[in-house]
């Protein structure tokens, strides 16, 4: 099952399938290691859902919800 990273629940894991977006946003995500094939674990969400904290490539990364909407994920275990 595929869904965007912003719709993940705390504790969910997945693999990045694609990174959408254009220009600076997409480049910034790639520079932070958000690339297809990387494994992602959603650690925390702020009370209003923005920002979110994920573990990717053995480090913690905080993303805005608007950035997470561009990351298409395959849910692990489904």
Image: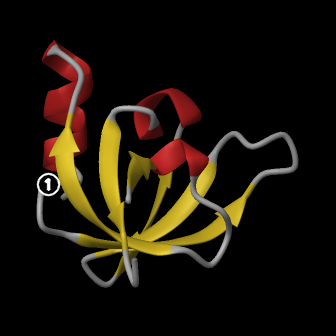
Percent of width and height locating residue 57: 25, 77
Report whether 73 appears left or right of 41: left
Percent of width and height locating residue 38: 19, 69
Q: Secondary structure at mark 1?
A: loop
Quadrant assignment for the N terminus? bottom left
Neighbours of disc 1 within 10 Å: few (<14), some (14-19), many (20+): some
Q: Residue 30's quadrant in the figure?
A: top left
Which residue sits at x=50%, y=27%?
A: 66
Q: Is residue 27 above or below residue 49?
A: above
Percent of width and height locating residue 65: 56, 35
Q: Is residue 34 above or below residue 72?
A: below
Report whether 73 appears left or right of 3: left
Please state the total of marks drawn on the protein image: 1
Q: Is residue 67 above or below residue 33?
A: above
Which residue sits at x=44%, y=33%?
A: 69
Q: Residue 72's quadrant in the figure?
A: top left
The residue furthest right is 47
Report whether 74 appears left or right of 8: left
Looking at the picture, the colour scheme in use is secondary structure
The residue furthest top is 23
Which residue sits at x=24%, y=41%?
A: 29
Which residue sits at x=19%, y=29%?
A: 26
Quadrant assignment for the C terminus? bottom left
Q: Please name the residue that numbered disc 1 is placed on.
A: 35
């Amino acid at each position: 099952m595929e869904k965007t990273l912003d719709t993940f629940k705390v504790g969910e894991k997945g693999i990045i399938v694609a990174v959408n977006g254009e220009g600076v946003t997409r480049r910034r995500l790639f520079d932070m290691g958000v690339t297809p094939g990387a494994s992602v674990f959603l650690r925390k969400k702020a009370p209003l859902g923005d920002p979110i904290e994920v573990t990717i490539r053995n480090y913690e990364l905080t993303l805005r919800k608007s950035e997470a909407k561009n990351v298409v994920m395959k849910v692990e275990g489904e």
